[in-house]
Amino acid sequence: MSQPVVAPTVLQRWPTFRRTFFGPPNSLRPGSGIVPLDEVVATAEALIAEDPPKPVVLPAVINGSTHYFAMAFTSDQSRTLRELLQSHIGRTWTDFDGRSLVASNGSDPLEQAALAFTGDSRYVYRFRVGNQASARNSVRESVQALMASFRSAPHRQARISLPIGRLIGDLTDACAARAEHTAHAAYKILAADHRLSQANRLFLRIQLLAAFDRWDELEQHPELDTLLRLPRPILASDALARLAISMLPDLNLEAFSPIATRFNGLIDSVSAIRSAAGARYYTLWALAAGESPDHLRERLAEAGWISDPGIAALLNTAPSDPRPTVEETTENLVDLRERAKQAIEAGRFDAAIDLLTLLPADRADLPAVVEATTHTFTAKAITLLERHRAEHGEEAIRSVLGSWRPHHPLESAPLPDMLTRLFSDATSPQQMESLRPSIERTGIAELRAPGGTDAVCRSILKAMDGAGPERLSPGIDVCIDLVRDLKTSDAPVDDVRSLSHRVLELWAYHDSSGDRHRAGRIVHLVGDLVELGLSVQAYEEVVELVRAGWDPFLTNADLPTGLDLLEQLLAHRPDAASNLSNFAVPMLSRIGPHNAVRIPSAALAVAVNLAPSFELSLDVPAPSPAIHEQGWSVRPGTRVALYSLQEQALDRTARILRERHPGLDVVICADHVATEALRAAARSADVFIVMDRAAAHAATNALKSERAGMPIRYAAGKGSTSMIEAAETWFREQYAVGGGPSAADSV
């Protein structure tokens, strides 16, 4: 009896398909030196090698025109692939219409190869890209992000996606920490998520570029002019304001005039200011419209932005408004209403609030009042709204709001009151979710105002009084966001210290979740807090709080995170502080022969190195033989350069790497600027490991420029463990038996 014929698998069909697809009429050839092409092909090979194989997208250049072929291997994959192509690619730069090759006549050799590879014409999509360089670049980036998302997805088909808010929060955290590599990785995940609209993807891209001062790329973005006309989130407007200010040769009204013509009213209220650049743009826009410097000075002082020297210089040199002051025309209601209308049309809502406040609570002014107060959340705006609410009733307010902007939330409660509601056991999960946008919208404006941070700290302390973890735990992430945003706004150090300490206390005593993601955020919060400089008493309080909250994370899996936190506490410990062992000893003393094999090798080496600092000696097997059992070792003379501003962690990393890899040449750099020593190390090192969470922007820019395509790897944290892991990952890829340089080395 003859044996049944077994059809070749997708992986078995790949060599034939690759040879045919990258043949005529396709002029692209893998291995010809086109780095992005080789990266896409390598990713495709990894995707089809999985079980089951995952979709792939491959390029072809035919008679000078760029085409892409997207291929799936099941009907479910095909539907998902079509949706992802529509959200990631769309028709902005391509002719993609969502149709597969089901109607193809099969005469095209590349289509024939794709059909043979997938086994079904319904699983293949083809689209052509516009001839503009910007179109090709945009599509290439989108395809790379899409492929990366396929590769990072779990093997199981049924999975729970992370909430979009969580993913956006990770991106915002990375931008705030100046962790550029982590921020780009977070953006790629978001860009590959079909739940995110094209407009929101653009907003996040703009914020990412601005966070790392990539002004040339931002100014030349093909969608910039479109973005300036769109309604935008506050953070996107702040990013554009930072771009506008970076384009000013001098901070004066004359230089601002052409900028104002293009950018218009980006920051329409002091409550929308998120950075010093945003405050300066707001001031310039108001002065250009003829607002009184005295009124602006008062308004900015109330909002906590008057200390900026650039703003002070602008207000001191600005000419006074030649028109009569508002107080001199209070009887002229027609004039007041006209000026308020003009202010609203120009996006100067604080000025409109000032004018509307002088008018009686007339029902005819209610639409203007609602529009102005939905853009600015100052105390004066809230007072104005409440006066009209008392006069005309809640239904009148809602009626006007619904006709002007349907479903727009109108939350007029001060931030401390909203936090009290957030932590109240009477607040449902649905109500809590509706509070979050209001807190995000008003948070910085109220925290920056004189006394605002103290009021919020008192609110958190009051919420903790007698409350159980079940009631307070869900609101902790919102409070961590407030700390992050306050620090990013360059607020006074004392305010950042006090709020950070209060939120750390909230987490330590009232977090019942055991959430590792939140614990990682607390590690960054504590690192930022101790870097600000603490007294001995304040430092020891921080250590005790960390100790109180860390019990759920005394596990093998959480040891790298705990070591990262320990190293940051150790690096900034005041000389007289004596209680760090209370946190270190429980974490380190649990390590022994019984669990050493289950602990990551780099973390184990760091723990062994740290133990003597706390009068401990860990009884663990020597780690060095285990490295070479995997079939690789570092070639003697290999040079690795390490860059970080965390000098203790830097020295520890270098010492451990030399011990684990005899013959390794390790160079360390801790420069704040682009020194010649750093440039020389960048040119000579085989691989450069950068701790971008603890780095100076000028130095990292210089070393990237000097590397010129040579490999750079990034540490995930601010401790030795992540630097060692980054280095040894590259060693393993470079020197594994039968291996060579990885595709990532070209990044």
Image: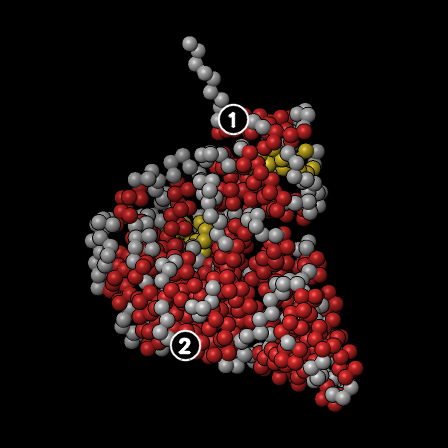
Q: Which label was assigned to residue 339?
A: none
Could you tell me which quadrant the N terminus lies in? Answer: top left
Q: How is the image coloured?
A: secondary structure
Residue 192 horizontal/vertical position (percent)? 55, 48
Q: Give x and y (percent) for residue 201.
A: 60, 54
Image height of 342 relative to 169, above or below: below
- SS for tag 1? helix
As drawn, 395 above or below 560:
below
First-in-chain label (1 vs 2):
1
Any mark on residue 462, and which?
2
The amino acid on which the numbered mark 2 sits, given as a three-letter code, is Lys
User: Picture quarter containing residue 357?
Assistant: bottom right
Q: Is residue 42 visible?
A: no
Identity of the residue drawn at 48% across and 71% down: 421
Residue 436, given in percent of the width and then of the height, sits at 52, 65
Residue at 71% over, 68% down: 264
Q: Is residue 273 above or below residue 593?
A: below
Which amino acid type is shown beneath numbered disc 1? Arg
Badge 1: few (under 14), some or many (20 or more) residues near its Cα, within 10 Å? some
**Circle 1 sits on which residue?**
13
Spot occupied by residue 182 in the image (x, y as percentages of width and height) = 48, 55
Give the structural element (helix, strand or loop) at label 2.
helix
Disc 1 versus disc 2: distance between alpha carbons?
66 Å
